[in-house]
Amino acid sequence: MTEMKSAFNVNCNNCGLQKICFPTGLTRNEVDRLDTIVERKLPLKKNQHLFESGDKFSSLYAIRAGVIKLYSFTDTGEEIIHGFYLPGDVLGIDALATKTHQMNAIALDTTSICNLPYQELTNLSSEIPFLNQQVLTVMSKEVNDGRMHSELLIKRNADQRVAQFVWNMAERFRNRGYSSSEFRLSILHRDVAIYLGLTPETVSRILARFNTEEIVTWKKKEVMIHDAQTLMQIAGVNSFTCGECKKETA
């Protein structure tokens, strides 16, 4: 199985995630300039917070390895999960308006982070127009992801929600150059259930059936997609366009 390797000491120009993160489309010199403001701290350990609700906003964060869960609580103490962030994703945008984080970000396994001081990033963006465009693209993606999540909860039944979650994760791994038919996912079924607005029992029952029907196997942290086309049909994905997935599942 392909594993994601930490690029903790790698600069932006040599980072395998540069096609996903901010350096996309920048010249080598511009990437070097971006690299000068990036702060690489020690990796977060599992269950260690990157930031918590109420913390002052100062940076955006790009994930180099690991998984981050973004969550909050209702007034009655009920957990709400807003998303899961993989290598190449950028988070912290939730605090741009208030300058204070409204949510909590916790590492689900050992996670390496690139800290992008926002004021320095803004100053650099004024000198590199394409970098400013990249920042706006990240913001747009955050808005679109939130809209899609809302639609998922409103318009999809339980089977469709679980299937679409697995398929979306597979696509995210594929876009990062990793296998989309077999990958490691450090997300508890309980967290998936909360994110999808389902009970843990319902998610476990659906995954057990998918396993019996040889569609998907998800045991502990290992996910294997055996029948991508059927998974897509259940998820309600309109067209099968992933050539690499066809090769992997053939």
Image (cartoon, grey):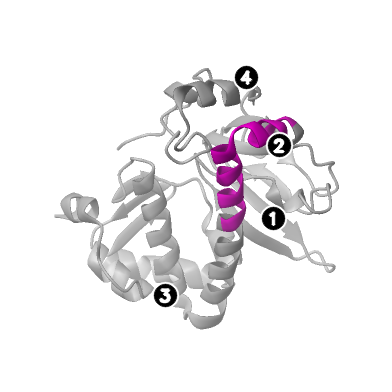
Q: Amino acid at mark 3?
A: Gln
Q: Earlier in the sequence, mark 2 or mark 3?
A: 2
Residue identifier under label 4:
36
Q: Earlier in the sequence, mark 4 or mark 1?
A: 4
**Horizontal and vertical percent position of residue 38:** 63, 25
Nearer to us in this view, 12 or 219: 12
Residue at x-position 48% and y-position 26%: 6
Separation of residues labelled 4 and 1 (CA atoms):
31 Å
Q: Earlier in the sequence, mark 1 or mark 2?
A: 1
Quadrant position of residue 60: top right
First to last magenta residue range: 120-140
Residue identifier under label 1:
71
**Horizontal and vertical percent position of residue 24:** 46, 38
Q: Residue furthest left?
A: 250
Separation of residues labelled 1 and 2 (CA atoms):
26 Å
Q: Secondary structure at mark 2?
A: helix
Separation of residues labelled 3 and 4 (CA atoms):
44 Å
Nearer to us in this view, 231 or 37: 37
Say which quadrant the N terminus sits in.
top left
Residue 122 - label: 2
| Image depth: mark 2 or mark 4 in front | 2
Separation of residues labelled 3 and 1 (CA atoms):
23 Å
Residue 138 - label: none
Q: Amino acid at mark 2?
A: Thr
